[in-house]
Image: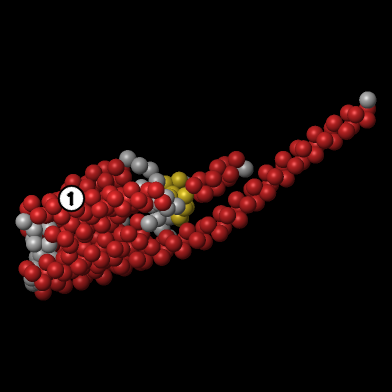
């Protein structure tokens, strides 16, 4: 009873979402396979090079299979960050390159020191409070302006879009590390902006070196949209079940307390009669 009660207390402190089902894992595998075949087709067609394909594949594995293990995720994050930094800086996307090595790698290190799992469940906080929303908006604005100025100092040709894309990506990474449910929505905007940015790069410099990065972000977008609906549906179903069980536990406690009061009352009455 006590353990159940503590478990449901944790539930009301945040959203509890079940681990990925086998069906969802199969969907991820199919997505990775389809996009990998498409990426390989572009390489063989001569539209992309092998370095871009390696970045594409490692980026897909890193984002789709976060459960591979802490050390594996950290290594993948480091490799993807370094390769992406090279590609981004090559096209003058200095803000995007900076966040991959200066932010994503430290965030991955932070993630490896945290344990979000409790048994068969993953804990996700309910949402950002109104006060934190104000602070978050201020942080986003300051970050965006700072990254845009960083691009200006380095002579980027995509100042606003690069700064905005990088700011959205880093804020979504913060939301994910802190396990806020808003991450699922915020991440979608970040990926759309990144796709727009790399399309602009492709129009300016050609498809070589950018096509598979566009495809990579598009794969992330499709996956995160699916993930949002899966997690949201799981949360709603889990909430309904756990809420009902929590109410039953509370009712049992009330009954037990009333019984205690009743027994004390009966004992005092019987004691008075004896006197």
The part of the image, by quadrant, that contains residue 202 is bottom left
Residue in the image at 20% along x and 68% along y: 196
The residue pinned by badge 1 equals: 146
The image shows residue 65 at horizontal and vertical percentages of: 30, 56
Q: Is any part of residue 207 visible from this angle?
A: no
Residue in the image at 80% along x and 34% along y: 264
The image shows residue 92 at horizontal and vertical percentages of: 8, 58
Question: Seen in the image, is 46 located left or right of residue 2?
Answer: left
Q: How many marks?
A: 1
Q: How is the image coloured?
A: secondary structure
82 or 170: nearer the viewer:
170
Question: With respect to residue 26, does 177 lie above or below?
Answer: above
Give the position of the N terminus as an image quadrant. Answer: top right
The image shows residue 100 at horizontal and vertical percentages of: 19, 51
The image shows residue 68 at horizontal and vertical percentages of: 31, 51
Mark 1: few, some, or many residues within 10 Å (few <14, many ≥20)?
some
Question: Seen in the image, is 195 located left or right of residue 252?
Answer: left
Question: Seen in the image, is 155 located left or right of residue 77?
Answer: left
Residue in the image at 72% along x and 42% along y: 256
82 or 25: nearer the viewer:
82
Furthest-bottom residue in view? 45
Residue in the image at 29% along x and 42% along y: 110
Give the position of the C terminus as an image quadrant. Answer: top right
62 or 250: nearer the viewer:
250
Question: Seen in the image, is 70 located left or right of residue 259?
Answer: left
Secondary structure beneath dot 1 equals helix
């Amino acid at each position: 009873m006590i353990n159940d009660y503590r478990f449901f207390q944790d539930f009301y402190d945040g959203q509890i979402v079940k681990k990925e089902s086998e069906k969802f894992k199969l969907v991820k595998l199919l997505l990775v396979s389809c996009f990998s075949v498409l990426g390989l087709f572009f390489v063989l067609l001569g539209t992309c090079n092998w370095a871009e394909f390696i970045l594409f594949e490692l980026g897909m594995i890193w984002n789709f299979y976060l459960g591979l293990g802490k050390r594996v995720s950290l290594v993948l994050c480091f490799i993807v960050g370094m390769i992406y930094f090279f590609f981004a800086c090559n096209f003058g996307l200095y803000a995007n390159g900076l966040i991959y090595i200066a932010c994503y790698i430290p965030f991955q290190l932070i993630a490896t020191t945290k344990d979000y799992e409790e048994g068969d469940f993953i804990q996700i906080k309910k949402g950002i409070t109104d006060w934190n929303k104000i602070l978050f908006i201020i942080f986003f604005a300051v970050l965006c302006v700072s990254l845009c100025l960083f691009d200006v100092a380095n002579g980027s040709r995509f100042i606003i879009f690069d700064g905005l894309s990088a700011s959205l990506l880093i804020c979504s990474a913060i939301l994910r590390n802190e396990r806020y449910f808003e991450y699922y929505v915020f991440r979608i905007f970040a990926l759309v902006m990144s796709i727009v940015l790399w399309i602009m790069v492709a129009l300016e410099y050609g498809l070589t070196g950018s096509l598979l990065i566009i495809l990579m972000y598009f794969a992330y977008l499709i996956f995160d949209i699916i993930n949002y609906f899966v997690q949201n549906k799981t949360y709603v179903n889990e909430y309904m079940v756990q809420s009902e069980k929590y109410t039953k536990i509370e009712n049992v406690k009330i009954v037990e307390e009333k019984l205690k009061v009743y027994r004390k009352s009966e004992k005092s009455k019987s004691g008075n009669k004896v006197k």
